[in-house]
Image: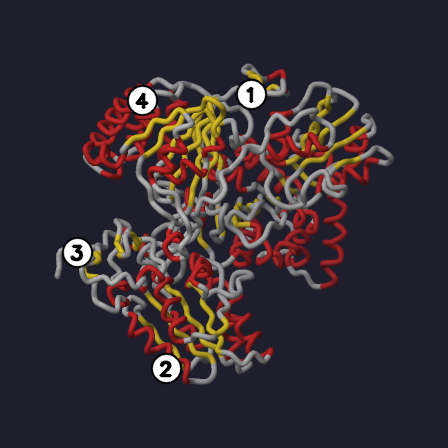
Amino acid sequence: MRSALSRRGNLPGGKEMSESYDILIVGIGGQGTILASNILGEACLIEGRHVKGAETHGMAQRGGSVESHIRIDGLFGPLIPPGRADLLISFDLLEALRYSHYLKKGGKMVVNRHLVLPTSVFTQNLPAPTQDEIIEALKKHALCLLDADTIAEEAGSPLSQNVVMLGAASQSIPLEPESLLDAVKRLVPKKTLEINIKAFEMGRKFGGTCR
Amino acid sequence: MGRKYLLGNEAIAHACLESGVDFVSGYPGTPSSEVIDVLRIQPDRSYYVEWSVNEKVALENALAAAWCGIRALCTMKHVGLNVAADPLMTSAYTGVTAGLVIMSADDPFAHSSQNEQDSRCYAHFARIPCLDPASIQEAHDMIPKAFSLSEEFGLPVLFRPTTRICHSKGDIEISEPVEGLRKGEFHKDPRQYVVIPAHTRLLHKKLNEKQPAIRKRLVELGYNRYTIQGKTAIIASGIGATYVQELLPDGVSFMKIGAYPIDEEWLGDFVKKHEKILVIEELAPEVEEAVRQAAGCVPVLGKKNGFAPFEGELSPQAVAAIMERAGFLKKNPLPLGDPLQNLPPRPPILCAGCLHRVAFYAIKKVFRDAVYPSDIGCYTLGLQLGVVDTTICMGASITVASGIFHAGDPRDIVCTIGDSTFLHTGIQGLLNAVYNGANITVVILDNRITAMTGHQPNPNSGMTACGAESPPVSLEAICRACGVIFVESVNPYEVTGMVTVLQEAKKRKGVKVIIAKQLCVISARRAGIKRGSYQVNPEICTGCGTCVRFGCPAIEFADERARINDLCSGCAVCAQLCPVGAISREGKK
C-alpha cells in the first residue's frame, strides 16, 4: 500500500511521512471556522488536489474552543499532529496561543487581533493574559496580526471576518488565489457575494504587507 | 459523478442515496446526526425519512420496513444502541428481507458523549456483521456493500463509524443516486416474525449456522486484508489503520481489519507467519482478542499487556507512541509538542440568552440546599452553574430523582430534563414517580427543539423531519395523563414569575412539574426574532458582580464595572437581576 503513494517527505528522525501542507484553523464556536475550512477544501477540489480535514461539531460548538484541521495533498489521516502545522489561522488571540504548539518550526501564523476572554475568567476570577502579553508571546513565530473585524466591517459586514482571515492567509497557502476566490464565490450566500469578494481581496492585500 | 469535498456524514448520506435507500429513521446524537439531516432536506426525495422519538422506536420502524422488502437505514450514536438493544438482539433471529443497515456512530474520547462504549461489541453480541471504516472514502464505499451484505445473509448489518470519520472531511469520489423500490409489502410468516419459544429456538440455530459463510465473505470483500513484508506485523482497525499506514516502517507486515466477525482460519495463517504482532484499535480489544485466540505462541502486543490504552481516541502521535513502545519505531517521529499551561480554559457554555441558564438560576434561588439530578442535552452545561448533580443517560433525571427520594434523602429534589429527552425516555420515569409516590419537582426545559445535536425537530416542534406540519404535542397533557396534579407552564425570562411557581411547588407534596417554555436562542435568531440588546450604565453600576455571577457569555467585567458585549440576545434577564437598575435596553433610558 505504500508503493501507491506519489508524494513523500521526511520527518525529523529520518521517518518518512506523506507530504501535505497542514493548516490549523482555530477560534470560538460560532465564529465561522467551518465555512473557512469548506472554502479551503473546495479550492483544493478546483485544483484537483487531495485534501483531508477534521473539525469540531456537537456540544463544543456552544461557545467553546474549536479547531479545524486541513491537510492539503493529505492522503492519510485528517488530524495534524502537534509540531507539524505549516500555518495556524486563529480567529481569536487567546486561541492562537492555546494552539501555538501545533506549529512546526518556521510555521506561519495569521491571527485576528480580537480577544474574547472565556466567561470563566469573569465568573471564577481566573487569571488571564492581556492582549499585549499574548501578542508578545506570539511574536516568536512568523506572525501576521490583523484587525479582521475592522476590515470585515469596511468590506460591508462584520460576518465576513472569516473570509478576511482566509484572504490574509492566502499569501502563505499553496493554492492559487483565483481558486480560493472561486471557492468563496461557490460557498457564500448569494446576497453576500460582493461583500465576501471584497473581504477576501482586502484580507489578501493586508496579508501581503506581513513579512 | 465525480469528486466532492464532504463531511464524513455527508458522504455516508450520499452513499445511501447511491444504494437506493427507501426508508430512513433515527434519533439525533453526535456524531451521527448529519446523515439524516442531509437525507431529510434532499429535493425530490422519494424515500421515507423520520426522526423517531428514540432509538428503539427508530430501529423497530426500520426493521418493519426491511421485513416489507424495502431497504432501510437506521442511525444513532453509540449510546442510542443501548436503547435499541432490545429489538437489535432479536432482529438477528428474525432476520430481514431487504437490506437493513444500522449506523451506530462511536465517540472515542467522548467528545460529546457520556461514555466510550464500542458498538463492535454489540455486533459480536448479536452475531450480526459489522463494518468499521478507516476513512471517509471507505465509509462511503461500504454503504452499498452493507445493504447487499444484509440482503445476502438476511441479517441487519451494523455500520460503525467513529467521530473521526463522521466529522472529518475529504475529497470523496461519489456516484449517481439510484431509485429504490419505494413500496413495501409485508408477507406473513409467523415462524420468522413471531418469536415464541418454539420458533425462536430454530431461528437461533439458523443465525449460528450463517456465521462461517459471513466470515469468508468479509475476507472476499476485501475489508479484511493484509500484505506480508517481514517477520513482524501490525494489525489495525478503524481510523487507527489509517494512522498506522502513515507511519509503517519498511519490512513490517500490515493487516487491516474493516469487518467483523474475523475469519479465524485466515487470521491464524497470517499470524503464524510472524514472530511478533502489534494490535492497534480504538476502545475495546475486539481485534486483539481474536488475534490472541489465533496466535498460539506468537507474542501479541496490545491493550491487554499495556502497550496500547483501552480508553480514548487514537491520533497519529498516539499511534507513533504505541509503535515506539512496542519496538516498531526506533524513535518517535511525532513528539507530543508542548502545550502552554495556565491559559484559562474555554469549555462550551450555554448561549447568551439561553432559557436553561435563567431556569437554573431560579431553581437555585428557590431550592438552595437541594439535590439536582439532570439529563442529556445542552442543559448538562448547567454543571458550571452548580445545578447539575447527576447525568447518566437519556431520560434518567426523573428516575434518579425518585430513586434518591425513596432512598430517604431528606433534602428537596429538583430534576431538569429537556423536551426532546422527556419525549425520548423521560415519560416512563414520570409515570413511575407518580405511581410510586415520589416527592420531587420536575422542571422540563422546553425549547421546542433538539438543540444540542443541531436543532432537529421533535414531536414538540410542530413539524416532522422533512418540514411537514404536525400538531405539537402537549407536554402539560402528557404530564397530567401520567397523574401529575401540579403542572405549571412558565416563561423563564420572567424571573419573578418562575420563582413564584417554584416556591409554590416547593410547598406541595408529590410529583410537581414545571414546564419552562422559551424558544432556543439559536432557533429564535434563525427565525428572525429580534429583541434588541442591553447595556450597562457605568455611572449606575456599582461593580457588585451579581450579573457577572449569572454566567452569561455576553457579560464581561473590566475596570470594576460590568459590560455587555455583542453576544447579547436581549433576553432582559440581567436587567431584572441587577440590584441597582444599571442595565437597560440599548437606545432606551
Chain identity of mark 4:
A
- For disc 3, the marked residue is B586
Q: Based on the displayed image, in which of its 4 quarters is residue A27 positioned?
A: top left
Chain identity of mark 1:
A
- 10 Å crowding of disc 3: few (<14), some (14-19), many (20+): few
Near-viewer residue (B325 or B16): B325
Near-viewer residue (A142 or B195): A142
Near-viewer residue (B429 or B279): B279
**Quadrant assignment for the C terminus of chain A:** top left
Mark nearer the viewer, 3 or 2: 3
Disc 4 to disc 3, C-alpha distance = 39 Å
Tell me if B265 is positioned left or right of A47 in this view: right
Question: Looking at the rendered structure, which numbered label has been put on residue B215?
Answer: none
Mark 2 in CB contact with mark 1 (< 8 angstroms) = no
Q: Based on the displayed image, in which of its 4 quarters is residue B402 positioned?
A: bottom right
Q: Looking at the image, is mark 3 or mark 2 earlier in the sequence?
A: 2
Place of residue B173 in the rendered image (x, y in percent of width and height, measured from the top left): 48, 26
> What amino acid is labelled 4 in the image?
Cys
Mark nearer the viewer, 1 or 4: 4
- For disc 1, the marked residue is A18
> What amino acid is labelled 2 in the image?
Glu
> What amino acid is labelled 1 in the image?
Ser
Chain identity of mark 3:
B
Mark 1 in CB contact with mark 4 (< 8 angstroms) = no
Disc 3 to disc 1, C-alpha distance = 55 Å
Q: Are marks 3 and 1 on the same chain?
A: no
> What amino acid is labelled 3 in the image?
Glu
- For disc 2, the marked residue is B504
- For disc 4, the marked residue is A210
